[in-house]
Amino acid sequence: MKYVTIKDIARKLTVSVSTVSRALNNDMNIRQETRDRIIAAAKEMGYFKNPVAMNLKSGRTHTIGVIVPEMSTPYAAKVIDGIQNVCYKDNYKVIIASSAEDPERERENIDIMLQFMVDGIIACRCDDSMNTDMFRKIKDSGIPLVFYDRLSSSICAPQVSIDDKTLAFFLVEHLIRSGRRNIAHITEDHHKIYNAALRFEGYYEALKQYNIPYNPDIVVHAEGMTYSDGASAADKLLSKPIDAVFAFTDTLAIGAMNRLRSIGRRIPDDIAIAGFSGTEISNIVYPKLTTVEPHQFEMGRTAANLLIQHILSPSDANENVIVEADTVYRDSSEI
């Protein structure tokens, strides 16, 4: 990836490099007309001021950008550990930005990464329907891009994930085989996250496999991804005759479980609970949470290795790598 330099701007406008430099630094000794022309050309050409020391000869910063959807759970931290494990050994610096599940902040984070002239970006999208233009801009600029965990349905790029649909199927099957028939599903806001759609498909297929009618009345779309959002989703199920809950994430599952326990529902006797994402939190709540635990550290390592491979040997190949995950059955679903 070759970034636009002040030399490129000077060449395009047939002015000196020093004139471009002074104009971009708002030197008042440069005529306003010339300054405006240089600034307009810089914007058009995609020029960013370089805030870090850059090796101009190689055109690389040896910096990798990582954009995560949230930092409120240990999930992202484990993935980042895996990324850093690879990057530091290969002498790459890592810049980390959290989008806080906010597409607007995610957009700002992408801009920041571009301004820092990173050699590549590893991202986990907070909304599959948003910022597609920005991720395409990354690709069109020749900057290697790798997605992890949350798949992208609209951007062709290497992706590292788990088999969400199959793992969700087996988790719901576990609930069914334990005698549950009225299994509610707490998902995110209308499948803005592609993985949510895959996990829903696994849920739906398990019901179908065991001849259990699908009931849309016990599928709740949480307004967010926090514990309180899980609790609010549980409130919408209080009047429903459910005997189990399968949630899109552990955070939503724990929020729902705590809410149900607070009104006297026994877990798992009255209602079994199962989550998905497998952070340490699932093992310290009461009762301990049945969940799917992706190998997060390995997910990070795999994403970093893929990205560096594409930095060193640019390629259009879009590998989809599936990493392992473990289904762990705990007290929240075991009577």
Image (cartoon, rainbow, N blue to C red):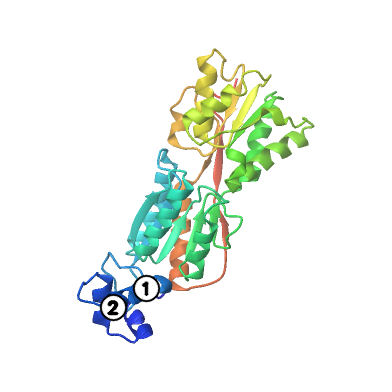
Is disc 1 in contact with disc 2, using a CB cutoff of under 8 Å?
A: yes
Return the residue found at the far bottom.
14
Return the residue found at the far right.
211
Viewer-side residue, 256 vs 311: 256
Q: Is residue 218 visible?
A: yes
Does 215 sit above or below residue 15?
above
Q: Locate the C terminus and report the quarter of the image it occupies.
A: top right
Residue 319, by quadrant, is bottom right
- Name the spot of residue 62 as percent of width and height, x first: 34, 67
Does 149 sit above or below residue 65?
above
Residue corresponding to mark 2: 20
Mark drawn on residue 72: none
Q: Residue at x 78, y 30 (%)?
A: 213
Q: Residues within 10 Å of mark 2 (few under 14, many from 20)?
A: many
Disc on the earlier residue, 1 or 2 = 2
Q: Residue at x 57, y 51 (%)?
A: 128
Tell me the kind of residue under disc 1: Ala
- Name the spot of residue 300 as percent of width and height, x first: 45, 53
From the viewer's perspective, tell me whether residue 272 is left or right of residue 5: right
Residue 236, by quadrant, is top right
Return the residue found at the far left.
29
Tell me the kind of residue under disc 2: Val
Residue corresponding to mark 1: 42
